Amino acid sequence: MKNSIKIHRKSKHFLVTGTAAVIAVLFASTLLYLGAGRMFDYYIATDISEKLLAGVRPLSVAVCSGALGIEYFFKRKDTDKL
């Protein structure tokens, strides 16, 4: 087996949870946008949809940065033990 990258369990959990949150926000934004005028009031639904969509990118960056921070913390903790 070649050198494989090992990701700490807490980092994986943070990535999976964060990715699920990003997908949920994106799904809600899409649902509001597609349902605008049909199921929801058009102007309110499109406004909320745009705000949710604008929040997806910062949320994605926060999830990636948080996972990297957790991974860095545990790698540094492991090297300090040695």
Image: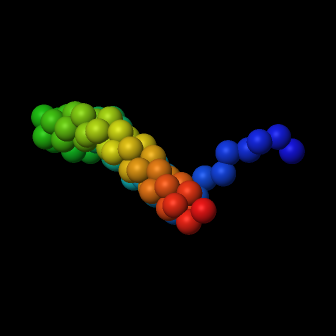
Residue at 35% across, 39% down: 61
Up-down relation of residue 25 to residue 80 (above or below): above
Is residue 4 visible in this depiction of the protein?
yes
Is residue 67 visible in this depiction of the protein?
no
**Image quarter hosting the N terminus:** top right
Quadrant in the picture for residue 38: top left
Q: Residue furthest left?
A: 43
Q: Which of 65 and 40 is in front in this view?
A: 65
Is residue 67 left or right of 43 when viewed as pictured?
right
Q: Which of 50 and 14 is in front in this view?
A: 14
Residue at 15% across, 36% down: 47
Q: Which residue lies furthest to the bottom in this view?
A: 81
Q: Residue furthest right?
A: 1
Count of numbered circles in the view: 0
Q: Residue 21 at what x, y percent from top left?
A: 39, 52
Q: Residue 64 at what x, y percent from top left?
A: 42, 43
Quadrant in the picture for residue 45: top left
Residue at 56% across, 66% down: 81
Is residue 20 left or right of 61 when viewed as pictured?
right
Is residue 29 left or right of 24 when viewed as pictured?
left
Residue at 38% across, 44% down: 65
Q: Residue furthest front?
A: 82
Q: Which colour scheme is used?
A: rainbow
**Image quarter hosting the C terminus:** bottom right
Q: Nearer the viewer, residue 13 or 3?
A: 3
